């Protein structure tokens, strides 16, 4: 079981080759009786796609991880990463959005969203993005969102200070 934890930790820290080695070793030992968490399949699948170029196998494992553990945001992150490796940006975006629906504040998902460059919807979809009304409404929406976030952070800080 220690090999499983070390493999997942290595992958989550970006050491994909080491993580792949540890997770593969754990899988080949067979001491798990088929009862493995979705994170195992998620990290192993993305590591296979990333390090060995086995994109189809990796995607299949990531999809399996989402099936058996659908409420784990990291599974969607690894699925989105694997779709991007397979040059399927549309599916990567969908997997990312599903993960963000589960946890809107997940750091990894938010960082991947910035990397993908997903924009928010235009305020008035029937007008072009560059239209001055859309730009103005978009700026208002962004400043409103920033004020809300600042208020939430301040409130959270005050709650922690009271404890």
Image (cartoon, rainbow, N blue to C red):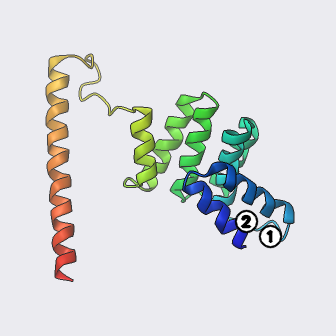
* 23 left or right of 10 in image: right
Point 15% across, 63% down: residue: 154
Closer-to-camera residue (25/101): 25
Number of marks in picture: 2
Q: Position of residue 124 (x, y in %)?
A: 24, 25
On residue 32, the disc is 1
Residue furthest bottom in the image: 163
Quick check: 80 above or below 41?
above
Q: What element carries label 1?
A: loop
Rendered image: mark on residue 42: none
Relative image position of residue 121 (x, y in whole percent): 32, 31
Local crowd size for mark 2, using a 10 Å CA cut-off: few (<14), some (14–19), many (≥20):
few
Quadrant housing residue 21: bottom right
Q: Residue 77: percent from the left, percent from the top?
A: 53, 48
Q: Could you tell me which quadrant the C terminus lies in?
A: bottom left
Looking at the image, which residue is at 14% across and 50% down?
147
- Classify 10 Å Cα crowding around label 1: few (below 14), some (14-19), many (20 and above): few
Are the residues flagged by discs 1 and 2 in contact, CB closer than 8 Å?
A: yes
Whether 116 is drawn above or below 158: the answer is above
* Element under disc 2: loop
Question: Could you say where residue 146 lies in the image, as x and y percent from the top left?
Answer: 18, 47
In the image, taking residue 62 as reference, residue 116 lies left or right, namely left
Question: In the drawing, what numbered circle is on residue 36?
Answer: 2
- Quarter location, residue 87: top right
Image quadrant of residue 91? top right
Q: Can residue 118 be seen in this view?
A: yes
Q: Give the alpha-carbon distance from disc 1 to disc 2, as whole Å.
A: 7 Å
From the viewer's perspective, is 87 left or right of 55?
Answer: left
Frontmost residue, 27 versus 151: 27
Residue shown at 78%/56% (left/top)? 24
């Amino acid at each position: 079981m220690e090999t499983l934890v070390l493999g997942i930790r290595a992958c989550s820290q970006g050491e994909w080759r080491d993580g792949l080695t540890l997770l593969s070793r754990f899988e080949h030992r067979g001491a798990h009786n088929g009862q493995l968490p979705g994170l195992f399949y998620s990290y192993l699948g993305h590591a296979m796609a990333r390090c060995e170029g086995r994109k189809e196998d990796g995607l299949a494992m990531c999809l399996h991880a989402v099936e058996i553990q659908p409420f784990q945001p990291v599974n969607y992150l690894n699925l989105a990463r694997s779709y991007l490796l397979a040059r399927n940006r549309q599916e990567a975006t969908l997997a990312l959005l599903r993960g963000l629906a589960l946890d809107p504040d997940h750091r990894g998902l938010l960082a991947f969203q910035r990397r993908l460059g997903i924009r928010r919807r235009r305020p008035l979809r029937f007008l072009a993005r560059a239209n001055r009304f859309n730009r103005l409404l978009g700026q208002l929406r962004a400043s409103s969102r920033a004020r809300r976030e600042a208020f939430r952070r301040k409130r959270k800080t005050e709650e922690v200070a009271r404890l």
